[in-house]
Image (tube, rainbow, N blue to C red):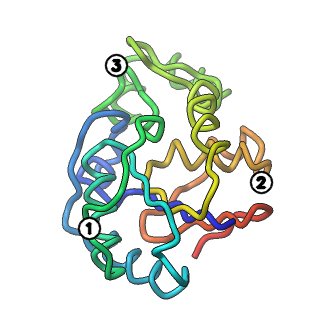
Amino acid sequence: MTIFIIRHGQTSWNAEYRLQGQRDIPLNDLGRQQATRNGKTLKSIAGDLDSYAFVSSPLSRARETMERVRAAAGLDPKDFSIDDRLIEICFGDWEGRTIPEIAADTPDKIRERKSDKWNFVPPGARAESYEILTTRVNAWFSQISRPTVAVCHGGIIRCIFKLTGVLDSRAAARLDIPQDRILRWDGSTLDWI
């Protein structure tokens, strides 16, 4: 069973290296172009897309990405489901800030995060570590029962690399997640297209 996983297109906060987390930041023009290109790529590689389930994070940057992917693939842009388990990791009080900005205020917290990024929980209500996020992602990933296209976030994709055993937690936490490529899981390997 094939699963295609697409990170949402770029936002202005991505371009500024701001921690977005669960803040609902819209796509920028480059992000819209990335989503459309990913939709064309998906159409060329996936075969019969009518047999796939399509699911998105509830955040608008993911939903718009999904709409553009589906439109570029020749499908009804609005015909997909939303799953709250695909929402991005919560960075708590750090959302909207860059790492250099945070380091200027609390360099000890940045050092703590750097020593164990996977298990670090930022300050603030509802903040999550990647380990905490993995529980939520596993609840979604383990119940997939048919070919699926998912649009989600970098944190979710890091958790999938860990859950599938492709990377350990240290490598998964530091992984660069592109917004202009599609990740394919075939049950045994993950590869970027």
- Do the numbered discs 2 and 3 sit on residues whose CB atoms are within 8 Å? no
Q: Residue at x 29, y 53 (%)?
A: 63
Q: Quadrant of the C terminus?
A: bottom right
Q: Do the residues under discs 2 and 1 have CB atoms within 8 angstroms? A: no
**Label 3 SS:** helix
Q: Position of residue 22 (x, y in %)?
A: 34, 33
Disc 2 secondary structure class: loop
Picture disc at residue 166: 2
Image position of 23 with respect to 112: above or below? below
Three-letter residue code for mark 1:
Pro
- CA gap between label 2 and label 1 equals 32 Å
Between 34 and 56, which is closer to the camera in this rendering? Answer: 56
Choose top left, top right, bottom left or bottom right for residue 179: bottom left
Which kind of residue does numbered mark 2 sit on?
Val
Residue 93's label in the rendered image is 3
Q: For mark 1, give the secondary structure.
A: loop
Q: Is residue 159 above or below residue 56?
A: above
Q: Is residue 6 left or right of residue 27?
A: right
Q: Is residue 41 left or right of residue 93?
A: right
110 vs 30, left or right, is right
Mark closer to the observer (2, 3): 2
User: In the rendering, at what x and y percent does residue 27 appear?
Assistant: 23, 57
Amino acid type, residue under disc 3 in the picture: Asp
Q: Seen in the image, is 164 located left or right of residue 177?
A: right
The CA span between labels 2 and 3 is 31 Å
Which mark sits nearer the N-terminus, 3 or 1? 1
Report which residue position mark 1 lands on.
77
Q: Total number of numbered labels?
A: 3
